[in-house]
Amino acid sequence: MQIKEQIESLRQELREHNHNYYVLDNATISDFEFDTKLKELQALEAKHPEFYDESSPTLRVGGTVTKNFDTVVHNERMYSLDNSYSKEDLEDWEKRMQRILGDAEVEFVCELKYDGASISITYEDGKLVRAVTRGDGFQGDDVTTNVKTIKSVPLQLKGDYPPKFDIRGEIVLPFEGFAQMNAERIENGEDPYMNPRNTASGSLKLQDSAAVAQRPLDCLLYSIVGQNTGITSQWQMLEKAREWGFKVPEVAKLSRSTDEVMAFVNQWDSGRHNLPYETDGVVVKINSIQHQDELGFTSKSPRWAMAYKFKAEQVSTLLNEITYQVGRTGSITPVANLVPVLLAGTTVKRASLHNADQIAKFDIREGDTVFVEKGGEIIPKIVGVDFEKRSQDSKPTEYITNCPECHEPLVRTEGDAKHYCVNYYGCPPQITGRIQHFISRKAMDIEGLGSETVELLYKEGLIDNYADLYTLTKEQVLPLERMAKKSAENLVKGVAESVKIPFERVLFGLGIRFVGETVAKKLARAYKNIDALMDASEESLVAVDEIGERIASSVVEFFNNETNRSIIARLKSYGLQFSLSEEQLENQTDKLKGLTIVVSGVFETVSRTELKKIIESNGGKVGSSISSKTAYLVAGDKMGPSKRTKAESLNVPIVTEGEFLEMVE
Ligand code: AMP
Ligand code: ZN
């Protein structure tokens, strides 16, 4: 075969698999095979730059850095939508339309109102040429390179598409991916993101498109605009868009009356809680494009469309007190302590106030009656104050200036949303927080020692840092509250045994800011021992795959600190692992690079932990639950039937222990 044809056929094949996987949610190839083909294509393209194609599936991984996003005028204006909140509102809208359309029968198309960042994407001759944010409706930012990394956005269309058109949709961050991103951030000592919508729209403006490619963004389309598209109804538009390869949710309904529209609204008002992404209402559109043209636009919105907003579940309650929490990295989080109140099925007692700006924005004060809301979001939030109920002698909240725990002045660096207590070695919750992190399951996993005991030990002056754990004696801990002879022995034994824990987990346990489990593994694999890592410069660190400047400077800062260096020296003298083991060095391969593998059940020849280690030392990632992104499920004995069913329904290949071990042979 000619090289050109070979490249073309690989591109075509990968496109098809991409579409099946990300748009239709129905994988037709294993991740492993996909990656192999992708690598093959990458290699061919690198060798033959003359066959470059801006729509090649290899461009999905990103890599282009945009310093400034160009402003682009929309081909056609992006309008807002009018809002309605009741059946009466809808009937009034229908009457207004009848004044223009006369007695013509109208049909309504009901769609969900996806809550994310709006986007307008231009296609020419079936190729994605530009993606622009909504901006002010007239012009927005050119975010083409970033949007191209979103896997459900087709770079090349199929079928009978018109030569040129714009398609509009919403870029969303599904809950599951959002929660996962936040879990990782918390583990890395970063603040979690507030909600999926803002995170989705923030993602579009990231300078590094490779970072965007890492985020589990999705793009849901709902409207095609342009001349001579041949489309005569909204319903047909949705169908055509699907045919051409776009992701258009199946949840939509053609209705003949406002009663039918209300039935759809009511169904999804509760049904939306089971959707994978956020929605904040229903959008009702007149089906016939001819009718739409007759109705036209007001100065800000189409007359032929109407948003019906879901009511966010909201209650009001009294805010008793604002307290402040100090995290293990010193970050301060204000917390609203509420009179307990029932909201969407759960009792809410506390809500995060995030930071000082958030309190100032709403002018939230102790003693206020506040509105608490649970929309699509997971954590309830305070959305405002009932000012009528505010008492005369209420005073504005003065944000604390000193740490509530150690009383040192707080610091807020420019660009940081939060205040920090920088008294790292003298602030009790930071000291105990670091030790608690060190002993936690994913780090040193010290048996016989829990978070409460750490606090007791610290209060009694027995420990000040994690190195002190290793000199504790049975006699010292025995007098502690609720400590018996047996538990004291277990504690000392558990600490002693932890010296066997492998290097990457020790590194994670040190609690370096932004160094989570994954980063710790990366660093351990790259530098192989702590001395090399301690000597590493920022330049050398950023050269490591997936290590950015922020992580690099945090690592350098950590190891430049004298206290940290002496603690590490002590840990070394107690025999902790500060380099990769011989075995790890021997077994490192890239065979499973980029693959997420889930392990379940009981195994015969290797333990589960060993199995996980094998996955990681071969460059793979251990997944906790099965999703369409899972490359393999390694099934042992006694695996639950639900895991199997889920894997089968998502076409995740299930392999036995033996088959898996052969793969990494
Ligand atoms: P608003 O910003 O409240 O005026 O609502 C208008 C926005 O709703 C549009 O800019 C779209 O981004 C968004 N939207 C979400 N889902 C849909 C949909 N199914 N049809 C039209 N617009 C939608
Ligand atoms: Zn402090």
Image (spheres, grey):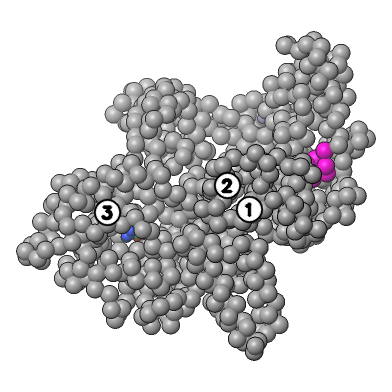
Magenta residues span: 501-506
Left or right position of 312 against 182: left
Q: Is residue 122 above or below residue 515?
A: below
Image quarter where the N terminus lies is: bottom right
Q: Going by the picture, which residue comes out furthest to the left?
A: 103
Q: Name which of mark 3 and mark 1 comes first in the sequence.
A: 3
Read off the residue under disc 1.
654
Q: Nearer the viewer, residue 215 or 160?
A: 160
SS for dot 2: helix
Left or right position of 606 against 231: right
Q: Is residue 175 visible?
A: yes
Residue 293 figure quarter: bottom left
Q: Nearer the viewer, residue 363 or 538?
A: 538
SS for dot 1: strand
Residue 542 figure quarter: bottom right
Amino acid type of disc 1?
Answer: Ile
Picture coordinates of residue 571 (x, y %)?
87, 35
Q: Nearer the viewer, residue 399 or 385?
A: 385
Q: Which mark is residue 307?
A: 3
